Amino acid sequence: DLKDPQKSIPCGTIAATLTTSAIYYALALLFGASITGPVLRDKYGRSLDSSMIAALLSWPSPWIVITGSFLSTFGAALQCLCSAPRLLQSIAKDDVIPELMNHFLDNLLITALIAEFAILLGAVDKIAEILDFFFLMCYAFVNLICTLHSLLKVPNWRPRFRYYHWSLSLTGAALCFFIMFASHWQYAVFSIILTFVIYKYVEWKGAKKEWGDGIRGLALSTAQYSLLKVEDKDPHPKNWRPQLLVLVYDSFWSNSIMDKRNVNLINLAGQLKAGRGLAIVVALIKGSNWNCGDQQKAEEVKERIQHEMLRVHLRGFGKTLLFDENQMDGCFATLFQSIGIGGLKPNTVLMNWPKIEEENAVFAVELVEAVANDECIMLAKGITEFPSSSSDRLTGYIDIWWILLDGDLLMLTAFLLKQHKIWRGCKLRIFAIAEIPGKNVELKAMLQKYIYMLRIDATVFIVDDNVNHEDALETS
């Protein structure tokens, strides 16, 4: 309700702080100079017949202090009775609390009842201690948000006060938390937990109508800051892990169900990622971006993909790509070159082996473009036989057939699968082809030492390159 809040609030706050501080310091000096030590340390005034020392020293009558205290308390109560109902009404407009509180008179009665109930408890001092912690929590988080916005250079954070610096906000937040834990750490922990519960409730209700979601804005700023710190170059091999681009294609996208192969492919991606890293699922749809019907179909497919990703706990993004058969090469080439942002982009392509003849052309273009962009390629054949995330835990073996230059990727893939609860009971077996006759023992010792250095538990088997068909069947 101020005419110029940006100017009045800083000036008024600083003036009020300086004025009250000067009064409190002056009272402390005057009381210390005019009252003897034993009386000054008598908190409840028993030596003065339970009288207030400030009232006895007041002029011209002790009733001056009593009347002033009453008027001050009454004024603060009226201020709260005016502000609290309006605050409840504003929160109700954002659908955080029931619409019953969308009327000022109802909120006024609720506020009065709460205040009266607290008074009737007869423990105002105890209630005041708890309320102080919530005020301190409010001040602390306001200061923290100001600090983070200043450090992250958020565009909509433009403080007009010329002497503001983020270190002042950080100091204020630290002092608030220090006072809380120094006075009563149990109340401090309880206040923090309750504040977190209230925040999660507001987040669940989705209150983003008028005042926006501050945490989302902070998350976007943090994500931008982190992405700029990630260098756009190949990571060190020790830090490399598959960042999946999952390509799902169906020549006949249904409006109600998804092909089981595509569902199981998303399941496999979820088991490989175990909720970590980057995953982008792209549904390939034949159609035109200029056709409203194709666009609506693409949105429906995108929603189903996001639903499946949520069901298998695959964190990432679901997207759709409309392409024309005559522009297939250009569409897929653009997809592989532009997907991701900065250093955060997919490095591994996961796709199904074609089942019908109509899928061969799309599969061939996907394969060629993935190779052209130096992507690791994972082809899932017989994906319908793979276990879903709701299946029983498996027991048995995961066999790795060591291939030159690809053995590391195969072992890493098997190791990541074992991190999921479905595959955790399986054991790893590594089969290597002995290309040089008579070197089986040396090759096995080398592989055993290598997987030991990688801290992966697996059993190594050496297979001669001249193995007959019956031995191969027995091994498989």
Image (cartoon, rainbow, N blue to C red):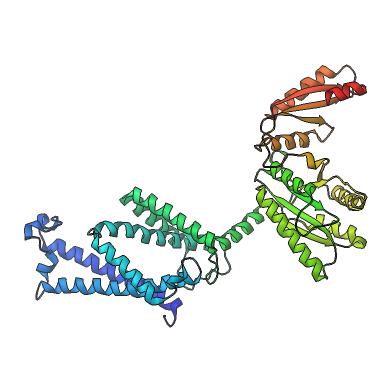
Q: Position of residue 149 (x, y in %)?
A: 53, 63
Q: Residue at x 70, y 34 (%)?
A: 415
Q: Which residue is more in the foreground, 186 or 5? A: 186
Q: Quadrant of the N terminus?
A: bottom left
Q: Residue at x 45, y 63 (%)?
A: 142
As drawn, which residue projects farthest toward the bottom?
A: 3
Residue 458 appearing in the image? yes
* Looking at the image, residue 253 lies above or below residue 27: above
As drawn, which residue projects farthest toward the front?
A: 256
Residue 341 appearing in the image? no
* Looking at the image, residue 435 lies above or below residue 21: above
Q: Position of residue 317 (x, y in %)?
A: 70, 55
On the picture, is 282 further left or further right than 221? right
* Looking at the image, residue 428 lies above or below residue 382: above
Q: Position of residue 254 (x, y in %)?
A: 79, 58
Q: Position of residue 292 (x, y in %)?
A: 80, 71
Q: Residue at x 10, y 63 (%)?
A: 51
On the picture, is 350 further left or further right than 218? right
Q: Which residue is more in the foreground, 264 or 274? A: 264
On the picture, is 441 further left or further right than 91? right
Question: For residue 139, what is the image quadrant?
Answer: bottom left
On the picture, is 336 further left or further right than 243? right
Q: Residue at x 70, y 37 (%)?
A: 417
